[in-house]
Amino acid sequence: MKRKFLAVVVTAAMVAGALPGIALAAPADEYKTETQETPDSQEELTEAIARGGEIDLTGRRIELTSPLSISSDVVIRGGTLVGTDSVTGNLVTLMGNNITLDQVTIQTAAANKSALHAYGTALTVNGLTIDHSSAAGGAPIIISSGADAVFSGDIRLTLGNSSWYGINVDSAKADFSGADLNVTTAADAQSVICREGESASVSGVSLTVVVTEKDGGGSNQQTAYVADSNLAQFVAAKTAAGADVSRIELHKDVTLTAPLMLSEGMTVSGASDGFAINGSDALGRENVVTVTADGVELNGITIRTAAANKSALHIYKTETILNNVTLDNTQTAGGAAMLVNGGTARISGTLNLLLGENSWGGINVDTTNGDAGVIFEDGSQVNAAGEGQNVIYVDEEDRNNGNTVTITGAEEAGLAQDADGNYITADAEEDPEQPEDPDKGDGPSEDGGASDEDSRPENENPAGGGNNADGEDSSDDSAGNDKDQENGGEGRAAGAPKTGDDAGTPYAALAALIGSGAAAGLVLKKKKRLG
């Protein structure tokens, strides 16, 4: 039988709507146990559990005035178990050898903690709904102490502000291959699944993994499985809490709902498949990924802007390592594929730069906030495809502000310096017939794009809005207040790059250029001189 893929749906309180899930539930097993008479109270349910076998609670609502412990091998079908405030610990604890829950609903009260705790049992779940929104703490589901849980069907969990996470797998195993997992989170620091303990195993989940070194009990390592809609918020919350985020692993392409800030040393990897971190319109005119701490390494990933976003990657006053990275800036509201802002980008492997008509260039080296540069390690290579922009460029005002621009190893990586001190691909040739733009500096060009002065990027703070080193937004993008205004220029208010759906060259075409080597023949010289 082919393995069914897991579709995950998470609705964060701060994100409107929910992502659609794909229901690929495995059918319920055929149970051959004798069905008991239907219990109507906790007392009758406890007696039925002691006898074992199959218990049909379909259509029944049973209030739990004390913790419910299940130590026998039973199958419970249907029904709703409702917690009351007289229970101050976990509501339902499973300790039998083999227990099956089929289409069961559990609802916690304000005094309850975890709704369902599988302790050392072999648990089979087909369809489960848990409302943990009013609980005092804990998680909807805890699987611990050697338990082995297999989930299928529609698994719906609703978290509250006091919930720790959705599902805790602690020194146990959990398989979600046949499940459609729908989790509604209520706080930034909540993950869909949390894995703890060296023997813990989680399978059948294609969520992004975030590893923290001090988040488990006694400052132990913890592995969180986080939904797209909450990834940036989760990382920021864990960093603020001192949990020591050490690793982010992509197991599929993810789409952010907020800029991803990497504010402590960590590795971000895309496995062998080169998964992408995608911006979205929800980010607004911000950069997709911003690095503000030393010790960040990006391995085998793609970072891609949406039409509303600025730069794909912003390195702010720090050194960042890029190993086999693709920066896709084909859609942008105006920005470079990478902005090195008072910091250093250290390139190894292959760097692919995909640029669109609104891109300001491949790598903007900005010294407003200190010395800045790019280091190409031995064996590194740059591929670029775009609309005539420089691969590396420095604004004229940044060349004369007293700070230093350092570009090392560019020639070995396939680049050549032009007469303006910027860099293009070594095989690119200047077009001697290309005229100077007659509208330079006077606002938008005839085709609706930005004039040369209007296309210069601003000196961005980590949040992408203004120029202050402390992250305060000193500009008003809607009014066009940017670096040009700080230096007495006219700003970009009259000539902001257009952001329509037709902006940029289609990604597939650019990727084909890079893959075929044709990109090396493109003229990646900026059509209109900067500065």
Image (cartoon, rainbow, N blue to C red):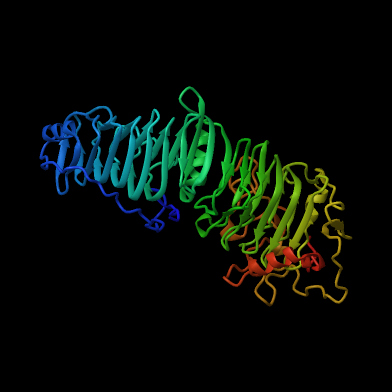
Classify 132 as above or below 514. above
Residue 466 at x, y percent in the picture:
62, 49
User: Quick check: 490 left or right of 395?
Assistant: left
Residue 508: x %, y % from top left: 64, 67
Q: Is residue 81 left or right of residue 222?
A: left
Question: What residue is rendered at 89% in x and 60% in y?
Answer: 419
Q: Residue at x 65, y 41 (%)?
A: 469
**Residue 319 spot, x, y in % from top left:** 72, 40
Q: Is residue 72 left or right of residue 428?
A: left
Residue lying farthest to the front in this orientation: 32
Q: Quadrant of residue 512?
A: bottom right
Residue 234 seen: yes
Vertical position of residue 309 compared to residue 187: above or below: below
Q: Is 392 above or below relative to 85?
A: below
Q: Quadrant of the N terminus?
A: bottom left
Residue 394 visible in rendering = no
Residue at figure coordinates x 20%, y 31% from the top left:
85
Up the image or down, 302 lies above or below 120; here it is: below
Count of marks placed on residues: 0
Viewer-side residue, 160 vs 459: 160
Which picture quadrant has residue 479? bottom right
Q: Nearer the viewer, residue 489 or 426?
A: 426
Q: Looking at the rendering, in which quadrant would you find the C terminus?
A: bottom right
Q: Is 174 in front, or is 359? A: 174
Q: x, y percentage for residue 138?
A: 34, 32
